[in-house]
Amino acid sequence: MLVRFEDGSSKEFESKMSIFDIIREQSDELTKTAAVAKVNGELKDLRTEVDSDCTIEILGTDTNDGLKTLRHTASHVLAMAVKELYPDAKMTIGPAIEEGFYYDFDMESLSAENLNQIESLAKKMIKKGSRLRKYDLQRADAIKLMEEKGEPYKVELIKDLDENAVISFYEMDNGFVDLCAGPHLMSLRQIKGFKLISSSSAYWRGDSKNKSLTRIYGTAFDNKEDLEKHLAMLEDRKNRDHNKLGRELELFTTVDIIGQGLPLLLPRGTAVVQTMQRWIEDEEERRGYMRTKTPLMAKSDLYKLSDHWYHYKEGMFVIGDDSDEENIDKEVMALRPMTCPFQYFVYKNSQKSYRDLPCRYGETSTLFRNEDSGEMHGLTRVRQFTISEGHLVVRPDQLSEEFRSCVDLAKYCLTTLGLENDVTYRMSKWDPDNADKYLGTPELWDKVEDNMRTMLDDIGIEYTEAVGEAAFYGPKLDIQAKNVYGKEDTMITIQLDMFLAERYDMYFIDKDGEKKRPYIIHRTSIGCYERTLAWLIEKYAGAFPTWLCPEQVRVLPISEKYTDYANEVKNRLVAAGIKATADNRSEKIGYKIRQARLMKLPYMIIVGEKEQEDKLIAVRSRFKGDEGQRELDTFIKEINKEIADKTIRAVEVEDIEK
RNA sequence: GCUACCGUGGCUCAGAUGGUAGAGCAGCUGAUUCGUAAUCAGCAGGUCAGGGGUUCAAGUCCCCUCGGUAGCUCCA
């Protein structure tokens, strides 16, 4: 057989051979770094035997697939160590994930100390080294083996496989065996950095009805330096975490007695949000939106009309008891979890002609959602939030153009905030296997999803498709972003809805004089302000672009002698519309600068004898450090341009201290 | 909602095995009047999240509630 290699070379082999042996024929060195291989483009374990002409791409531990293989093998080492220390632990699954691996066990939960013990044993095992031997069993034998080993979860996994599936196992030198499809490293010696990160819990098969398992997260690398770098990066993330930074920078706080998921925006946080809100409201109005202001609550009947009541009552704050038979006539209200029906009634206030469409309604809308207690987090998952909500009522022939304009607006917002490269687009589809969760028929869903796909392809954005992520009334384009810990959230969503117009009996009179159903686009432009603020804090580590800063300039007199001049400068800045303050405390200049830097201010103006005499100012920025003296008017002109243009100024000097 | 961990002055944290709370920063007062990331001194500040229990004695042990963190599950 003829084996072709990635580099273009090829070699003839007599008989069938494992990929590993083929690699060894090539070079002994290569066996030290090779982790896995692609045979004719398909990922294969190095133990795989080839017996016909093929192309082989050898993937080292420095490649994505190679590192993934290494980490998968590391998860087996973890399992081996756990089984040695906790023989009663039952193994379940242990895959490689983005930044490492995890393994789920049915066992007691673990303390940090337990984790350390497991880690040291695992490291010892790696140091000792072991080859991994792979062997296949028929289904029945596989079940028998795992029953003998007392691994009920493995038995369950095997039973899910096809009757005549061949099931592979990997065995270590010490006899530790794990059911696994592979691929795996040939031996443990390639694992050079191993670290357990945390333990937590996870449900068996990801279903909250199932048993809660103990999950151990870890990571592994093919060299120590990368591990160190990774751990340093994990540490650095904490410094960007909005939940920590946002409190330090006095942007928001929470108060036990006020309640979970109910953050208080402090003056600084409010200033940032207000700046965004004014910008977005103006921008939307420029784009033909009409602003509404609708009630924060309504009778339950309103939500019944849309089916929200039946689909999401658990997620609503209901006022009054609708199960109280005695007072069946008593009004039951609910705080609104969305704005849709309110704006529908704005539309329905007058009869609409085809000429009136599209109707674009926008509202800075406060919503209430009764999230489960374990779900709340900082500003990203809260029970009350304010969103740049909007609904477009459109004729079918306008759908495509209006959808595009919504995407356009969202992209404009992202670009202006400097976030456009940090998002991914996801088309969220319904789940035909859970049809009762959705309104409408499969035919309609197929139609509207095809429609969305066409529009997305037309616009030319790259997107993934996700089953079961749709709203109950239609598919969504979700714009996703990851937080500092890599957890993904929806920042912006644009949804197609072909059901609710009928529910609320919305129509327009078409050219032919007939009543027609409009389509509705549910959308947000900048998302909800709390979540977007959180995202911005993490993106900029609290050092917002100047136009968003709650305090743009702080005037720092060298000593109290120059307080009057400092105030004069500050007053002129404020009069010019700049968010400026003066720090007139009798502190040394270095101290004042330090504090202003810690609060991540973009500009400091330092005034002393020289400036007062020459009627100048000395500028220090977080972008360039000491920028020297200039006229105040020049500075005002420059900063006002920076604010008006929403410039994102690049930082040219590094912080001396974090 | 589940599992685990955590909750000590505004903030960050120290307070083995139960013996009656301590530091730094911030704050206040005074001194200092200073040229680009921390001037000095003094003062004040805590029913140790809340409630219940065990004990001669609880910040420390147990239970409940509230709140926080991580992961899971959920997210119109």
Image: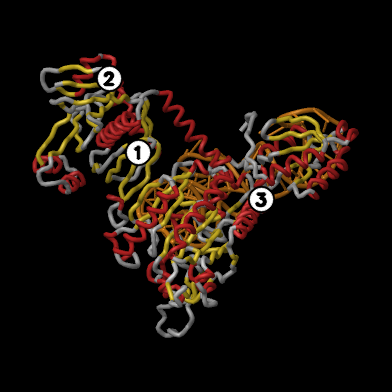
Label 1 vs label 2, nearer the camera: 2
Q: CA distance from mark 3 to mark 1?
A: 38 Å
Q: Nearer the viewer, residue A92 or A89?
A: A92
Chain-order first, disc 3 or disc 1? 1
User: Would residue A452 be visible to someone looking at this image?
Assistant: yes
For badge 3, the amino acid type reads Arg
Secondary structure of the residue carrying numbered label 1: strand
For badge 2, the amino acid type reads Gly
Where does the image place residue A230, in percent across and percent down from the top left? 44, 31
Q: Is residue A284 left or right of residue A97?
A: right
Residue drawn at 37 percent across, 33 percent down:
A219
User: Would residue A243 be visible to someone looking at this image?
Assistant: no
Q: Nearer the viewer, residue A603 or A236?
A: A603
Chain-order first, disc 3 or disc 2? 2
Where does the image place residue A586, in percent across and percent down from the top left? 81, 39
Label 3 vs label 2, nearer the camera: 2
Q: Which residue is mark 3?
A: A268
Q: Which residue is mark 2?
A: A8
Same subunit, labels 3 and 1: the answer reads yes
Residue drawn at 75 percent across, 32 percent down:
A590
Above or below, comparing residue A342 to residue A593 in the picture: below
Q: Which residue is mark 1?
A: A97
